[in-house]
Image: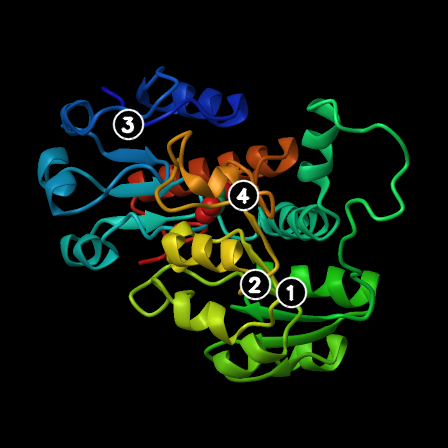
Amino acid sequence: MSRPKVFVTRKFPAVGLERISSSFDADIWEGELPPSREELLKRIQGCSGVLTMLSEKVDDEFFDAAGDQLKVVSQYAVGYNNIDVESAKRRGIAVGNTPGALTNATADLAFALLIAAARRITEAHDYIHDGKWKAWEPLGHIGWDLEGQTVGIVGMGRIGQTFAKRCHGGWGMNVLYTARSPKPDAEQELAAKRVSFEELLEQSDFVSVHCDLNEETKGMFDAAAFKRMKSDAIFINTARGSIHVQPDLIDALKSGQIGAAGLDVTDPEPPSVDDEILHLPNCVVAPHIGSATRSTRDAMANIAVDNLEAGIAGKPLRCSVT
Ligand code: DGY
């Protein structure tokens, strides 16, 4: 009997690829970069399942190209703003993602960016490499203290709460947050206080973004938002680049409207090498590596393959968004 056809849009951890190859007629894209749109639409034809990355646009054109036998799209990420979930639902196609597995790794990266921005680590690193370090400097590279500051968390889901735990438990920070609904556990355990977006901007020393990208959150950090923030505030974004308006962020960093930023996500992503965001001394940028630890990526791979297998078998997915 022929095995169901599956397309995997990039190489991902071996633990997942081996499982896919042993169960399915697997076509795995070997390129270092994602397949072109044309190639993608060609390769998914006749597939029962497609394992996608956040780089693929999964929309009506995608579903039409795949054909009526498509049963599941399994996204190797927790975020799925690249997928038209409503269209998938209408067509009866299951969509899965990988929540939970990357919570700690992403919260850690957000904290790493916060420390790096606050203590001006990349600026200091470049200073040495540029041959400028001549002696210990009583006034050089003065940064921010973390202990006891106020952190504002936008989006108090799994990752936001885990980041908040690090801030409160490790560094004694006061935690403010915005979220669609109150989070009683966080309020009890972390003395976290739910406030309006405006209050959060005005009162926080550090603002960290942990919400989904959707119509409501797209561009929410614009010139007006940066203007409300403290002039030495640090802005951290490990969620999605288009939650901030990048030209407005650049202006805010250059004009001293805010103090510094740490970004794991940019808009566009990736930025061109001459994008100004990469050349500001007070901005630390990482190439979307929030989930990039060995055990996290393996765990994400296993969830994504569980979702793929369940979807093709017509069973409920381990982690479904439909
Ligand atoms: C996600 O999972 O959405 C991250 O952005 C990539 O791991």
Q: Residues under labels 3 and 2: Cα distance?
A: 47 Å
- 57 displayed left or right of 21: left
Q: Nearer the viewer, mark 3 or mark 1?
A: 1
Q: Earlier in the sequence, mark 2 or mark 1?
A: 1
CB within 8 Å, label 2 to label 1: yes
Residue 226, how many percent across, how many down? 48, 68
Q: Which residue is mark 3?
A: 6
Q: Quickly name the residue at label 1.
A: 232
Q: Who's the residue at 63% across and 51% down the image?
A: 110
Which tag, 2 or 4, sits closer to the chain's start?
Answer: 2
Q: Amino acid at mark 1?
A: Asp
Q: CA distance from mark 3 to mark 1?
A: 50 Å
Q: Give the image location of residue 66, x and y in percent.
A: 14, 34
In this rendering, the count of numbered labels is: 4
Measured along the vertical axis of the image, is residue 61 above or below residue 89?
Answer: above
For the residues labelled 2 and 4, the Cα–Cα distance comes to 13 Å
> 10 Å neighbourhood of mark 3: few (<14), some, or many (≥20)?
many
Identify the residue under disc 2.
258
- How crowded is the residue under tag 2: few (<14 C-alpha within 10 Å), some, or many (20+)? many
Q: Quadrant of residue 153?
A: bottom right
Q: Is label 1 within 8 A of ligand 1 (CB to nearest ligand atom)? A: no
Q: Residue at x 34, y 43 (%)?
A: 268
Residue 76 visible: no
Above or below residue 99? Residue 48 is above
The CB of the residue at mark 4 lies under 8 Å from ligand 1: no
Left or right: residue 229 versus residue 219 is right
Question: Which sits earlier in the primary sequence, circle 3 or circle 1?
Answer: 3
Quickly name the residue at label 4: 280
Mark number displayed over residue 50: none
